[in-house]
Image: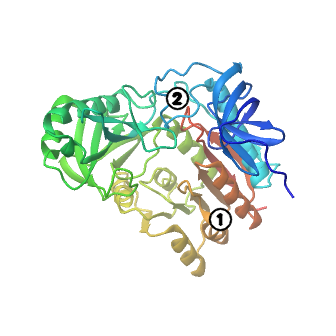
Amino acid sequence: MMSQPSLSLGDHIRLHLDSLATGGEAVGRHEGLAVFARGGCPGDDAVVEITEVTVRFARGLVVEVVTPSPDRVEPPCGHFRDCGGCQWQHIAYPAQLRHKTAIVRDAVTRLAGLPEVEVAETWGMENPWHYRNRAEYHAGLDQSGHLVLGFLRHHTHDVIPVDRCQLQPPLSERIRAATVALMSRLAQSPTERALLYKLATFVSFARGQAIATFVCQGRPEFLASLGRALQEEVAEVVGVLAARSRGPLVVHRSPAETVLGKSRLVETLDGYEYHVSADSFFQVNPAQSVRMVSRVQEWAGLRKGESVIDAYCGVGTFLLPLAESGGPALGIEADESALNDARLNAQLWHLRNVHLQRGKVETVLSNLVREGGHCDVLVLDPPRKGCGPIVSVAATRLRPRRILLVSCHPATLARDLKTLAEHGYPPRRLQPIDMFPHTWHVETVAVCEPG
């Protein structure tokens, strides 16, 4: 029987922090109990206020750094300690990369039970700031009833107004600032301003253009005038869209409708042009996406005429460069917006060997297995929840000579790698890529082969 922890809510304890966990918290031990501390850095001796206690672990907040770690730095963002967008600005960037490698290695070794797999050092960025091509600013009202746009406070629904985000490009920030100023003039009352729930920006780094999407309750009367005024204020805004939502904290919303201008942008990755709708998924870090596409191409090792399947193909980020080998290329995608973009991109690339199928990956792959299907190379790039056992097992039954798994979550990466290994496709090499500097998130490309 496990002993009850000696900690209580509100306790202040002295703790040495020695690692970082998935989720971004630093980890130390108190009388053998793991304590996850937000705001900590490995190497810190710190005072931690306990905010959660269970039989197996506790959580807390660093309230005082007694002896700082050599890797601790001053966060450049004044919102860092309140805003929930970043977790690691207080950790030197080279140390962030080391810890991301360690998190991936730990997941593969401890969670997947695959200690012999080669995990390379995480690829970092030369300039790990202002890298995101998308932002989603939450809207709120201040005490005077004026609009504020920002991000949510850690583990709350409180909107933190921002005056400058270090992860967003200047163009996104100009759109945010202009929207705040314009809404004070164009939406006359607090009740009308409260109809705006979110501002989503999408920026093309290659073209220097942007699309702004306003997520609202219904279609407020101010939308058209706001869109025109925004385009006059920020000339790079080539499209203004609107989407409907049932509430400010509801994740799902209606597809975006065009108010003014364009609904797609063009982004370039290593010479490849992709037309991407504002509603379609596309990697948020174009600079690192170039390296990721290159790694997938290299490890896929497609020979002329070989067949490829790209599950979760999105707008064709991996599928289209791989299809240039000339063999049959199948892309599977459930989202209609992304599939339409992939279809357009394939046409513009003059790729006649690409076939696109809309549907859930688990359904399409399972049907292919029943029909005796086969491919030479299979790419899996699932959302954060991972592939799951149905997709992973179906992938192995298509008998590819190589499976490429691209994952943005170490825990689901480990689960899917374990399933693939149990069905004859163990991972050979992993390459972590820092797509999300100053956060705990890490992208990983894994190559699996029969063995």
Q: Quadrant of residue 112?
A: bottom right
Q: Position of residue 140 (x, y in %)?
A: 32, 40
In the image, residue 20 above or below residue 423:
above
Q: Position of residue 317 (x, y in %)?
A: 46, 50
Which amino acid does the dot numbered 1 rest on?
Pro
SS at circle 2: loop
Q: Position of residue 146 (x, y in %)?
A: 24, 34
Residue beneath the point at 72% across and 29% down: 42
* Quadrant that contains the N terminus: bottom right
Say the numbered circle drawn on residue 258: none
Query: Badge 2: few (under 14), some or many (20 or more) residues near its Cα, within 10 Å?
Result: some
In the image, residue 409 above or below residue 377:
above
Q: Quadrant of residue 39?
A: top right
What residue occupies the far right of the structure in this picture? 1
SS at circle 1: loop
Which amino acid does the dot numbered 2 rest on?
Arg
How much space separates mark 1 and mark 2, taking CA atoms? Answer: 47 Å
Sequence order check: which comes first, mark 1 or mark 2? 2
Q: In this orientation, which residue lies closer to the viewer: 11 or 101? A: 11
In the image, residue 210 above or below residue 343:
above
Q: Where is residue 126 in the image (x, y as percent from the top left)?
A: 55, 24
Q: In this orientation, which residue lies closer to the viewer: 307 or 313? A: 313
Say the numbered circle drawn on residue 81: 2
Say how the picture is coloured: rainbow
- Answer with left or right where residue 272 lies relative to residue 10: left
Q: In this orientation, which residue lies closer to the viewer: 188 or 419? A: 188
Say the numbered circle drawn on residue 400: 1
* Quadrant that contains the C terminus: bottom right
Can residue 71 be seen at all in this image of the molecule? no
Query: Badge 1: few (under 14), some or many (20 or more) residues near its Cα, within 10 Å?
Result: many
